Image: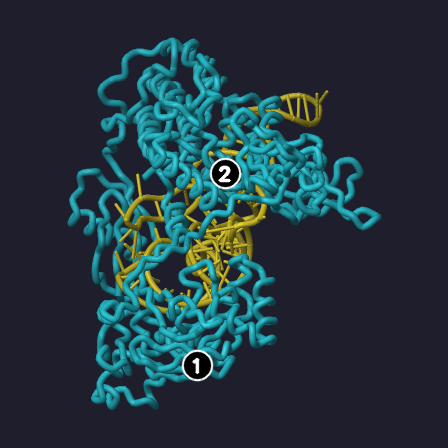
Chain colours: A cyan, B yellow
RNA sequence: GCCGGGAUGGCGGAAUUGGUAGACGCAGCGGACUCAAAAUCCGCCGCCGCGAGGUGUGGGGGUUCGAGUCCCCCUCCCGGCACCA
């Protein structure tokens, strides 16, 4: 619930729940007389409604049928080998050329009894579903392209709704309604539609005329009756291989013994420690070359044995480190006998988790998964690790660089460089302070040591103080957003806090009398501005938009500084009230200066104990309001009216305004008047 | 390719349910103070135009009295795609 919607959708897509039908094509294909997979080629499909349009099957390179066919077909064996060497990266699979090869084998269609050829396809994944798919070229874009490439038959089994009956075909003659007709040469979007408003099953015997849902139900039922299939839920989620051939992961505590096999490292020999003087050189796992690490003796039989050198995926550790933090206690320190103890249930789940958006799927999904496993093992009693999640945007900064004589690239830190502006203030380039010569500044990227574009918040704190650093970071941008760093705004934040300080000290000498029931003029305006700004700021706090809360405090100071200091205007009362609101609103953003001023002005001892300010409705009311006047939706002027003026009177008054009359003179007449209370009047002239 | 997010002045960003686009700040320009500079204070500041006015929220279309906001199509940028973490 406390998670951003977009992270939840990304995870849902990643888990990839998919409802469909699992069914089998039958066959009598044998390897050395042994029937393969009991004579069944299982496939999974979300489009069982198109089952009568199957013209071939495609299996993964690792599928048993492919392996068998390759035994007697060297060309196919070579193709399978090529597929195996291809990337398993999803991005590569999606963009690579779809290729395939006929196995020469056929299987029997479970409903029609027809013989269907079996192909090997490089786009079929052994790890998803059954490692085999039915192919319906007429109604799947990928199968369509594949069938065209290899000249395989295309059989239409879905018809556009408008063409469904013979009668409607005369109403939609092909010459005029080309787009509604199926054409084996050209893919059209509706071929793959599931919508009953667009398409119905066709050319499929008893299933003709059914919608997607009805056809899937009917076909699943018939397959079930034959014992050849049923509805099934499939997941995109794959198994998690946790071992890595890398040095820096957590060691896997296993010892390989020639006699005893894989033996776990006994408890009293844990933890297995990695050598600390290992230098990765990019050529595989450096642990494999460390005889001192690898050689050990078998805990069971004592003979010489080899230690496992694979380490665990770092996601393993990051999936539950927080639970371990919650296991430490002040009295005993970290519990060294158990993974977690009862303390964990007290502290977990994490109230507020903060991390970059790049973790939206992997780390956050693994952590949730891991928590649920620990819950199932009764190690913990919660099932979600993070109650609320804030996904930060990345912070980018300019990359200043220059080509060196030797052809390399030299990077410069922001403080070594000065920006060059044109007469409008637009940045046109940058030059190095040391020699005044230009440097390239086009690049923008995440902060990194090698590119020297990082900014250490400590340097801001050293120069301006913690309050300014905090204020600036809150003010710059909403946290979820990608931020292009610029420290030019820091000065402004610092200036603002200095003004707050100066204003507070000027005010500390003033004494205030009680505010009268009704203010007028300048002090009333200032007070309204402050309370209206407060109302908005409280709303923004609620929805966690802190940059506008920071700007609200600036607006309040602007209003206070405009207060006229007339003797009889009660300005001191308005100022003291307004400044107390400002301080409290600012206190979470700039805690130190606000606490000091709070005390010095005698508002109280501790600003953290003070009640959060609430706007006073009576301060917000105005006797007169300004209404914007639009003609045909375009801004043409404004008028000031009494707050209580009713709608007919507003309409009447608006029409008489010169800015409206101007448009009536040309002969138009008023067609309609729209009044938005307290905002505007729109006069439609036609 | 698929999934998710985004595009508003010179810059960072505001705009609650469709209702005055550009709040607040930065940079820039002009002025005051100063021998001078810094600091501070006052004013100007989307674009085109002397002006009236026109135009403007990535591009094209639509709905509406009225669109940054809603609908359709497109472009570009960023994140993720399971061995970077």
Q: Quadrant of residue A449?
A: top right
Chain bearing tag 2 is: A
Where does residue A676 sit, x and y in percent of width and height? Answer: 24, 48
Q: Quadrant of residue A478?
A: top left
Tell me if I can see residue A92 in this picture: yes
Which residue is label 2 attached to? A316
Where does residue A20 sit, x and y in percent of width and height? Answer: 31, 63
Q: Using residue A627 as the reference point, say whether residue A605 is left or right of it.
A: right
In the image, A435 versus A664, the foreground residue is A435
Is residue A158 placed above or below A318 in the rendered structure?
below
Label 1 – label 2 distance at C-alpha: 48 Å
Which quarter of the figure is the N terminus of chain A placed in? top left
Where does residue A98 sit, x and y in percent of width and height? Answer: 52, 71
Is residue B13 placed above or below A498 in the rendered structure?
below
Which residue is label 1 attached to? A186
Is residue A237 placed above or below A452 in the rendered structure?
below
Chain bearing tag 1 is: A
Where does residue A126 sit, x and y in percent of width and height? Answer: 47, 61
Tell me if I can see residue A397 in this picture: no
Residue shown at the point (26%, 66%) measured from the top left:
A686
Residue shown at the point (36%, 22%) measured from the top left:
A581
Badge 1: residue crowd in 10 Å (few <14, some 14–19, many ≥20):
few
Mark with earlier residue (1, 2): 1
Element carrying mark 1? loop
Q: Quadrant of residue A339?
A: top left
Q: Using residue A186 as the reference point, say whether residue A516 is left or right of it.
A: left
> In front of the other: label 1 or label 2?
2
In the image, A159 versus A381, the foreground residue is A381
Is residue A178 placed above or below A461 in the rendered structure?
below
């Amino acid at each position: 619930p406390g998670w951003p919607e977009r992270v939840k959708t990304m995870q849902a897509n990643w888990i990839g729940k998919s409802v469909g039908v699992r069914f089998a094509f039958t066959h009598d294909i044998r390897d050395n007389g042994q029937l393969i997979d009991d004579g069944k080629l299982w496939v999974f499909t979300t489009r069982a409604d198109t089952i009568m349009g199957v013209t071939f099957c495609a299996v993964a390179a690792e599928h048993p049928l492919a392996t068998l066919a390759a035994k007697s077909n060297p060309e196919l064996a070579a193709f399978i080998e090529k597929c195996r060497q291809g990337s398993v990266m999803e991005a590569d699979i999606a963009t690579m050329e779809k290729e395939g090869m006929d196995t020469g084998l056929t299987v029997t269609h479970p409903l029609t009894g027809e013989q269907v050829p079996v192909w090997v396809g490089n786009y079929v994944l052994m790890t998803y579903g059954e490692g085999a798919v039915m192919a319906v070229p007429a109604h799947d874009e990928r199968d369509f392209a594949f069938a065209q490439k290899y000249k395989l038959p295309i059989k239409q089994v879905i018809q556009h709704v408008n063409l469904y009956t013979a009668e409607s075909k005369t109403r939609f003659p092909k010459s005029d309604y080309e787009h509604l007709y199926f054409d084996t040469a050209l893919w059209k979007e509706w071929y793959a539609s599931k919508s009953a408003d667009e398409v119905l099953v066709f050319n499929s015997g008893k299933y003709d005329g059914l919608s997607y849902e009805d056809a899937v139900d009917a076909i699943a039922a018939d397959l079930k009756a034959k014992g050849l299939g049923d509805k099934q839920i499939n997941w995109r989620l794959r198994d998690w291989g946790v071992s890595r051939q890398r040095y820096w992961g957590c060691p896997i505590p296993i010892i390989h013994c020639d006699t005893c096999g894989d033996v776990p490292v006994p408890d009293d020999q844990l933890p297995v420690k990695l050598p600390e003087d290992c230098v990765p050189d990019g050529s595989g796992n450096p642990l494999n070359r460390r005889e001192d690490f690898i050689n050990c003796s078998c805990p069971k039989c004592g003979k010489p044995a080899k230690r496992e050198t694979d380490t665990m995926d770092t996601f393993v550790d990051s999936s539950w480190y927080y639970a371990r933090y919650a296991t430490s206690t002040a009295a005993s320190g970290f519990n060294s006998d158990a993974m977690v103890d009862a303390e964990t249930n007290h502290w977990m789940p994490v109230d507020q988790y903060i991390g970059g958006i790049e973790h939206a799927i992997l780390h956050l999904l693994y952590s949730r998964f891991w928590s649920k496993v620990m819950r199932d093992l009764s190690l913990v009693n919660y099932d979600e690790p993070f109650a609320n999640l804030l996904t930060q945007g990345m912070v980018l900064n300019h990359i200043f660089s220059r080509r060196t004589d030797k052809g390399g690239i030299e990077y410069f830190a922001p403080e070594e460089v000065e920006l060059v502006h044109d007469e409008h203030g637009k940045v046109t380039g940058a030059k190095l302070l040391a020699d005044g010569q230009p440097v390239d500044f086009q690049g923008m990227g995440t902060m990194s040591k090698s590119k020297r574009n990082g900014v250490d918040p400590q340097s801001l704190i050293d120069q301006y103080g913690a309050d300014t650093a905090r204020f600036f970071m809150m003010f710059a941008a909403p946290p979820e957003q990608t931020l292009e760093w610029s420290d030019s705004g820091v000065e402004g934040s610092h200036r603002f806090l200095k003004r707050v300080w100066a204003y507070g000290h000027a005010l500390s000498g003033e004494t205030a009398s009680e505010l009268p029931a009704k203010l007028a003029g300048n002090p009333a305006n200032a007070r309204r501005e402050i309370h209206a700004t407060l109302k908005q700021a409280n709303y923004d706090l609620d929805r966690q938009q802190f940059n506008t809360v920071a700007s609200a405090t600036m607006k309040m100071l602007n209003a206070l500084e405009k207060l006229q200091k007339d003797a009889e205007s009660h300005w001191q009362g308005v100022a003291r009230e307004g400044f107390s609101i400002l301080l409290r609103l600012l206190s979470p953003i700039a805690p130190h200066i606000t606490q000091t001023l709070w005390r010095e002005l005698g508002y109280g001892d501790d600003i953290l104990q003070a009640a959060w300010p609430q706007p006073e409705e009576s301060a917000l009311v105005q006797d007169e309001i300004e209404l914007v006047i639009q003609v045909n939706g375009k801004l043409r002027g404004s008028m000031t009216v009494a707050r209580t003026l009713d709608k007919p009177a507003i309409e009447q008054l608006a029409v008489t305004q010169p800015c409206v009359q101007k448009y009536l003179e040309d002969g138009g007449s008023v067609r309609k008047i729209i009044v938005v209370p307290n905002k505007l009047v729109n006069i439609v002239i036609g």
